[in-house]
Image (spheres, rainbow, N blue to C red):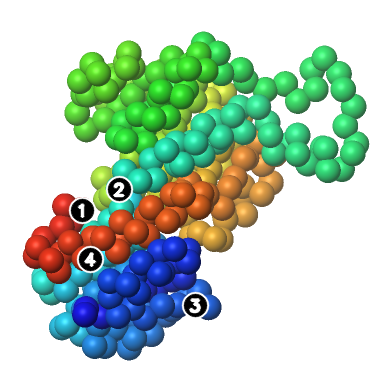
Amino acid sequence: MKKILVTRRLIKDSEEKAKKIFEATLNSNDELYSQKKVIEMSKGCDAILTSLTDKMDEETINKLPDTIKIISNFAVGFGNIDLEAAKKKGIVVTNTPEVLSDATAEIGILLILGACRRVSEGIQSAKESNWKWSADYLIGKQLTGTRLGILGMGRIGQKIAKIAKSLGMVIHYHNRSKLNEDKEQGAIYHDNLKNLFSVSDVLSICCPATKETENLINKKTLEYFPTGAVITNVARGDIVDDEALIDALNRRKIYAVGLDVYKGEPNLNPGYLKIKSAFILPHLGSATKHTRIAMANLAIDNIDEFFRSGNCRNKVN
């Protein structure tokens, strides 16, 4: 029986599955392991089931025991892992795509609604019991007829587009390549960022975090947007230059933001705290019981598939 290290606590159903298939070392207290501790605890193991909170950089990977053959990341993203370093050491890296698309798309729509309809301000007023109705009280932006730009029309982007279209939004998108008509669902393709941003009354960021997309939303690109646009991010915090976005919000170039992800999680740039129109969540994209079980089970299956066949369909390196 193969031995695996699971770095974070999983939902009970998934931990039971891991114990049936492997000799699994679990993290019952959900301690946030240091890189040094991950290296130490992985001795004698064949695989590690990691989370986004585990920083598996080149130094850490190079110090892992030679018995480690696969790192299965409990996430669709894998920015916490140095893929090249893992490849050089002969370690396969996998992720958990598809199973979290529905839950994440729901949060994507929530961010759009929350930012456009000034939900943060409304919640605060309701809690303080000091609001007074008037014809122009907390007037927000209606979605009907609004142009939604989707940056990254993958699984999550397509699901957000489908829901947004049902709400009467007009869908525009930019992707590495144009989708076929069936997947476009009537969305309008733009082959460059400037064209997409210039028609985006609301932007939904759904693209992966890569060297090419780091700080893609910056001082220069923010000027492409119509004045009063709304920007939402359900992808990764590294895609946004926080200082530039906060400045655009303060200048009212950008009307509001909806963020489920941001740089330095869980530490939020304090500039956002001063902005009433910022609707911010603590990375809840996949946070449903159904989805978290599906993600963990897929991460476990990735390890099982690798040791059974020598390969894995969800390999990312």
Q: Residue at x 34, y 86 (%)?
A: 41
Amino acid type of the residue tagged 1 in the rendering: Asn
Q: Residue at x 87, y 22 (%)?
A: 133
* Disc 2 secondary structure class: loop
Report how far apart the C-alphas of labels 2 and 1 lie in the structure: 8 Å
The quadrant in which the C terminus is found is: bottom left
Report how far apart the C-alphas of labels 4 and 3 lie in the structure: 20 Å
In the rendered view, does 31 fall on the left or right side of 154?
Answer: right
* Disc 1 secondary structure class: loop
* Disc 3 secondary structure class: loop
Q: Nearer the viewer, residue 77 or 59?
A: 77
Q: Are marks 4 and 3 in contact (CB under 8 Å)?
A: no
Q: Is residue 199 above or below residue 56?
A: above
Q: Are marks 2 and 4 in contact (CB under 8 Å)?
A: no
Residue 17 visible in the shown view: yes
Q: Are marks 1 and 3 in contact (CB under 8 Å)?
A: no
* Disc 4 secondary structure class: helix
Q: Residues within 10 Å of mark 1 (few under 14, many from 20)?
A: some
Residue 311 lies in quadrant? bottom left
* Residue, disc 3: 28
* Residue, disc 2: 97
* Residue, disc 1: 314
Q: Residue at x 21, y 78 (%)?
A: 2
* Residue, disc 4: 303
Amino acid type of the residue tagged 2 in the rendering: Pro
Residue 193 visible in the shown view: no
> In x, y percent, where is residue 113?
59, 29
Between discs 1 and 4, the one toward the N terminus: 4
Q: Are marks 2 and 3 in contact (CB under 8 Å)?
A: no
Residue 94 lies in quadrant? bottom left
Between discs 1 and 3, the one toward the N terminus: 3
> In x, y percent, where is residue 188?
32, 15
